[in-house]
Image: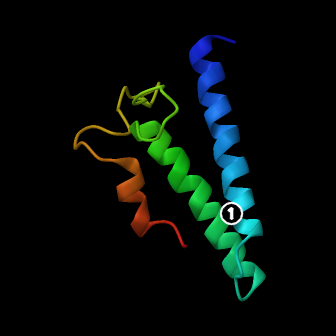
Amino acid sequence: MNDFQKAFLTAVGDIQNSCVQRALCSSADNREDELYSVTADVIYRILELIDGYGNSGIGKINITNCGTGESLKENPFIELHDAASGFITE
């Protein structure tokens, strides 16, 4: 594994740990709400990581479709963590 791959996967593991710990401290009214909350938290944090936010030090990541060459974040430019709000149940 190269350094970038290690840094990315370490950051993903840190996100998982942080979100699980936060969920353990929550007082959600029911299990379904709790599961939606923790999975939304993980998804948003990973999208923020890809968008270049946080303190991982890996910078912005571009995801490209190998078949079409289209960029997930371009044409038009979007911040994935902002755009996801209409698609993810919290």
**From this viewpoint, which residue is outermost toward the left?**
76
Return the residue found at the far bottom. Answer: 29
Name the residue rendered at 35%, 33% in the picture.
Answer: 71
Query: What colour scheme does the image use?
Result: rainbow
The quadrant of the image that shows the C terminus is: bottom right
* Horizontal arrangement in the rendering, residue 62 relative to residue 12 (left or right): left
Residue shown at the point (74%, 86%) measured from the top left: 30
Q: Which residue is mark 1?
A: 22
Quadrant of the drawing holding the N terminus: top right
Q: In the rendering, at what x and y percent does residue 85 appear?
A: 42, 65
Q: What residue appears at the point 43 percent right and 29 percent down from the top-left corner?
A: 61
Residue 73 falls in image quadrant: top left
Q: Nearer the viewer, residue 58 or 75?
A: 58
Q: Residue 16 location in percent, x, y?
A: 70, 48
36 and 87: which is toward the camera = 36
Residue 70 lies, in percent from the top left, at 35, 32
Foreground of the two, 63 or 17:
17
Image side of residue 81 versus residue 90, left or right: left
Q: Does residue 6 lie above or below 10 as drawn?
A: above
User: For the image shown, how many numbered marks are present on the structure?
Assistant: 1
Dot 1 alpha-carbon crowd within 10 angstroms: few under 14, some 14 to 19, many 20 or more: few
For residue 46, above or below residue 63: below
Of the residues shown, which amino acid type is indicated by label 1?
A: Arg
Rendered view: 67 above or below 76: above
Q: In the depicted view, which residue is nearer to us: 24 or 42?
A: 24
Quarter of the figure with residue 84: bottom left
Kind of element beneath mark 1: helix
Q: Residue at x 23, y 39 (%)?
A: 75
**Toward which corner of the image does residue 28 lie, by quadrant?**
bottom right
